Amino acid sequence: MVKLLHELILEQAERTPTAIAVVHRRTSLDYATLASLIQAAARGLLALDLNRTERVAVYLPKRLETVVTLFGAALAGGAFVPINPLLKAEQVAYILRDCNVRVLITARDRAELLKPVLADCPDLHSLVLADGISSIGRRMHHIQVIDWSELLEADAGRAAARTIDIDMAAILYTSGSTGKPKGVILSHRNMLAGAFSVAEYLDNRADDRILALLPFSFDYGLSQMTTAFAVGARVVLMDYLLPRDAINTVARERITGLAAVPPMWVQLAQLEWPAAAVDSLRYFTNSGGAMPRATLTALRRVLPKTTPFLMYGLTEAFRSTYLPPTEIERRPDSIGKAIPNAEVLVVREDGSPCAPGEPGELVHRGALVALGYWNDPIKTVERFRPAPGQNPGLPLTEPAVWSGDTVRADEEGFLYFIGRKDDMIKTSGYRVSPTEIEEVLYGSGQVAEAAALGIPHPMLGQAVVAVVKPLCDDFNESALIARCKQHLPNFMTPLRVIVRRADLPRNPNGKIDRKNLVEEFRTLFPESLV
């Protein structure tokens, strides 16, 4: 029985050694070869004196070396830290310092960009370059530099420290509404529980081909790989470029499973899908925010053979809920119920349970709850607290994660996402969900992307402002405002619509960057003009 993360691959290598595990461009690795590389990487990391639970960071695009490093670090008894390849040098250096990273795996061009900041990373002692060291040399500041091939050929002469399932396996950095990113600590148990739970309700199987579009630094992206390996399926690696490229890859690689976030789905829904893609895609999943109903309708029209799974998750608990596809017609706006082996509660600020239809905070308990935030005991205590009313009388309390997300449950227990606590717009004394406004904007058929924002206003507290990217050239702002007035009360109708022809800014996980937009338009309503 698999108890540790790397055993997913080692076990499949014994069961089906010649089955393809991972594909990158024109290169494929079967499970036996992937297992051999992971074992070699683990020996190499041990030769670099990696000790139990020490951190190994990976700052690479999705490529074979990335996969080998993540699981090799786990096999060596360390913890891997996937760094989003879109991050800049200062952001990378913050993670390296905050996480006390010992070994960094990257490429030559990225190492050159990092050179000015690596001197301030005192815990880092080894830099491994996936594409050779010719232009770098053997040292960078206090850090030894070695080639990837040298790592794979090294032999530590010692075994990894004993690891059990509650030990740390990974640290994923997630951005908050304020301050620096936080490192979420995940155990082997967390990640395996997530992989097997998701594979269960998606009915994943060995003949699945799963396209990994999202970054591995994002729990939803990492889950595509772990879920596939849990059942011996194939993962196809791709860094998201243009929507058309993703669709072409689905057709070429006969992809059966595809995961994306709402802004990606909005773009993908606008395109024609070739017959090969329509025929191969068995399911698609959405998380990272509510999918607009108009987008879901468009996807179901162009992908009539594909089963949609609407999900909700947070890095602190990997996955939390999913909507069974049989409920799509009845409740297309729902995020469903708890995934297998998890419980989800909706509670008031005092911890008491909410009544059906009453908004409250989503609290997740179970095997997927993370171990807390790295180097941040204060935020850990704030977010990881006992769930109310659970297992009374136990001498040790069971931690749950308090999500900070506002949801409501209907009479049958199906959940509906309302918004982030820190995204909620407070206008004229009302608390307004930006998601509800965006649904109306998308439903107009005029909008490709939309973000509803709360912008400081001297009379209203916050004014509702909609930033939209038109879907077509004949965009009619007046008609859009009229639709909002028809479907929303006055206090929710945007006071201003800002039209952008370019894509709205996104954070590294592909979600629309509300914080960036709010800062951009913070002075839109100066007091002297009101």
Image (cartoon, rainbow, N blue to C red):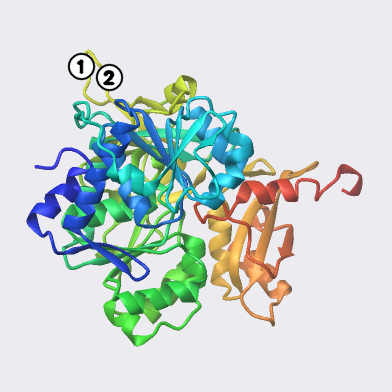
Q: Where residue 481 sits: x, y (%)?
A: 69, 68
- How many C-alpha atoms fall within 10 Å of the one at disc 1: few (<14), some, or many (≥20)? few
Please report the residue visible at 48 percent of the width from the left and 47 percent of the height from the top. 133
Q: Which residue is mark 1?
A: 394
Q: Quadrant of the N terminus?
A: top left
Q: Residue furthest top?
A: 395
Please report the residue visible at 35 percent of the width from the left and 32 percent of the height from the top. 48
Disc 2 secondary structure class? loop
Q: Which residue is mark 2?
A: 397
Q: Where residue 73 sits: x, y (%)?
A: 31, 38
Nearer to the camera, 59 or 313: 59
Question: Is 96 displayed left or right of 77 in the figure?
Answer: right
Please report the residue visible at 63 percent of the width from the left and 65 percent of the height from the top. 503
Please report the residue visible at 50 percent of the width from the left and 69 percent of the height from the top. 266
Residues at badges 2 and 1 in contact (C-beta under 8 Å)? yes
Q: CA distance from mark 2 to mark 1?
A: 6 Å
**Viewer can see residue 255:** yes
Nearer to the camera, 415 or 104: 104
- Tag of residue 468: none
Q: Residue furthest right?
A: 528
344 relative to 514, above or below: above
425 relative to 94, above or below: below
**Viewer can see residue 422:** no
Residue type, numbered disc 1: Leu
Q: Where residue 87 sits: x, y (%)?
A: 56, 47
